[in-house]
Amino acid sequence: MTDAREVKGCCPLDCQDTCAWTAHVEDDRVVGVKGAKDHPFTRGVLCAKVNDYQNRIYASDRLLHPLRRTGEKGSGTFERISWDEALDTIAQRWKAIIESDGPEALMPLFYLGSMGVVQRHALMRLFHGLGASRLHGEVCGASMSALWAEGHPVGFDPEEIVDSKLIILWGVNMLSTCHHHWQLIKEARSRHGTRVICIDPRRTRTAEQCDQHIAIKPGSDAILAMGIAQIMLEEGLADLDYFRAVAADTDAFAEQVKPWTPDRVAEACGMETETVVALAREFAAADPAVLRAGVAPQQTIRGEAFVRSLSALASLAGHWRKPGGGLFIFDAPAFDEFAAARDDLAPGETRSLDLSALGPALTDSTMEKPVKGLMVWCMNPAVVQVDSGKVRQGLAREDLFTVVLDHFMTDTARYADIVLPATTQLEHFDIVGAWGHHYLSINNPAVTPQGEAKSHGEVMRLLAPRLGLDHPAFSESDEEIAATTLPDGLDLETLREEGWRKLSPPRPDPSRSETKLRFAGDDPEPVPSDALRLLTPKSHYFLNSSFANMPRQRKGEGPPSLEMHPVDADSRGLVDGQAVTIRNERGAVQTALQVSDIITPGAVTLVGKWWSEPEETAVLANMLTPSIWSAGGQPAYNDTFVDVEAAR
């Protein structure tokens, strides 16, 4: 007789939707994963990335045993070893590094490969306990975080969007990156006849479903926002009483936007003057409107100017006054996920390294304390970080001892000295927040771990005694680690019974804040260049670099290609389907050309984060991105300029 059961869990990935799911298990094998029908956000549907997540567990190339490097770094040549050998090697090497170079020569590196509090943060207990380097920064959304730190509200309960009367989707391809949010838009349309406008240089899946698509010249987003503000002030459309209650620099902001007349904005943004004027008037008249912005427009050297300009518009129009109005980039449930890392275990203040700048951290010969030991989890920096050629140069250092925990032999893992097999979401316990709604979800293990895979909490518990760390925090179970993050009034058993809990922070109202906001000052001028601007949008079937090795997702995505507008192709003598070289001072990559008006002139797009293997799809866009950051620490992925020519 078949032993069949259903297990409540949730998706761990870097997505605003954080879906709840049910794993269907037969005889200790997951046979399917379905979206939870009763979850208010998931509503029974998973995305094209994870709707066969069980195949990730049983993939033929899954890492199931610890490995030790036997070939050159980057070659991917390893031998199988035992867990004791792996852990003893790590402990011995770390102790030697601490003795010779000090504990700050050890660098942790992780991001959002899993948003689970245990998988993300448990290993940081080791680094805090040893007095190693800490981390700061973000790969995406750093501009938003910089403004948030100043006090600018950047989100609210997204379920309010059903009451928005105008929705402006600014640089977000919702139907590919957070499609559950689209159901809120559909409901707003049904309730209020809400118009939906998409501002994006590319005609995405989302743009095609909107009432209007405004194809903006990439890099000019803040200018368009300045132009909208200028028209609102010039025509008396602004809610000045509200804006004065919010802004510390009302007059300075008015002076800053004054030169951005409709004609000047239209020319800078690549659109008609009438489009700018109509957009400003419609935005001001809506009661209320929401600016629903994405990550991509932030990813320039002037990303903070973009976020600040949208924050200004939301307050200038007074849209924060009503539910469904304001600015939405990010919002999260009210719990303390960082408590799981236990930074109180650190013996004192230690240096902090920018997690988005691994290349410089590993190659800067002037660094006072060079990084000698690196542990990477929940991240594939050799693919996703800017200037990944410099990242790989650093990872190739023979004097750098690198440990990687992952499910597969990623580009980063190929450079490791020790590779440890990590459990997938269906094999461990965790709790997961969100950055696009207010639900905290529980993840119960559906099956026992495959092979010798272990959770990151278990790796922490096994390494700690080998490193002489004996605080009780180093022996806590994964459940105990997760429990440290819960707010008062919610315990783990209750969350386990319910499956999820909505934990809403207070709705922001900047007019009631004790601190007034600054809206003027950032320079909105775009980065000038005669070359084509290379954009690297998120794909429909991959999540950053995750799933780029999975057969179904690769088939769904199709082979990589460079999208180019016919005007740009004709001027270069290029034709659809031919092989081209994309080149700049950092390197060159080759792919097929797709000539299409899907992208605005002056820009080209290479969708998806592809791996080095197999060679026929090894189109690594971040080999071309520069090592530059905005003032707030945002890697400027979208300030990448290239030439495109026929491949030799």
Image (spheres, helix red, strand yellow):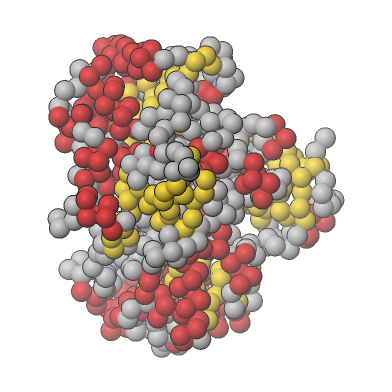
Where residue 176 appears, as percent x and y from the top left, is: 56, 59
Nearest the camera: 276 or 167? 167
Where residue 538 appears, as percent x and y from the top left, is: 56, 52
Q: Quadrant of residue 320?
A: bottom left
Residue shown at the point (66%, 55%) measured from the top left = 603
Check the picture and name the quadrant holding the C terminus.
Answer: top right
In this picture, residue 340 sits left or right of residue 237: left
Q: Quadrant of residue 602?
A: bottom right
Nearest the camera: 125 or 619? 125
Q: Is residue 300 visible?
A: no
Nearest the camera: 296 or 187? 187
In this picture, residue 528 sits left or right of residue 63: right
Where residue 275 appears, as percent x and y from the top left, is: 60, 79
> In the figure, 122 relative to 54: above or below?
above
Residue shown at the point (48%, 43%) measured from the top left = 2
Q: Quadrant of residue 217?
A: bottom right
In this picture, residue 259 sits left or right of residue 439: right
Residue shown at the point (26%, 12%) measured from the top left = 99
> Count the marks: how many?
0
> In the figure, 626 relative to 33: above or below?
above
> In the figure, 84 relative to 134: above or below?
above
> In the figure, 185 relative to 497: above or below?
below
Nearest the camera: 423 or 173? 423
Q: Is residue 62 visible?
A: yes
Residue shown at the point (59%, 31%) measured from the top left = 60
Where residue 466 appears, as percent x and y from the top left, is: 25, 16
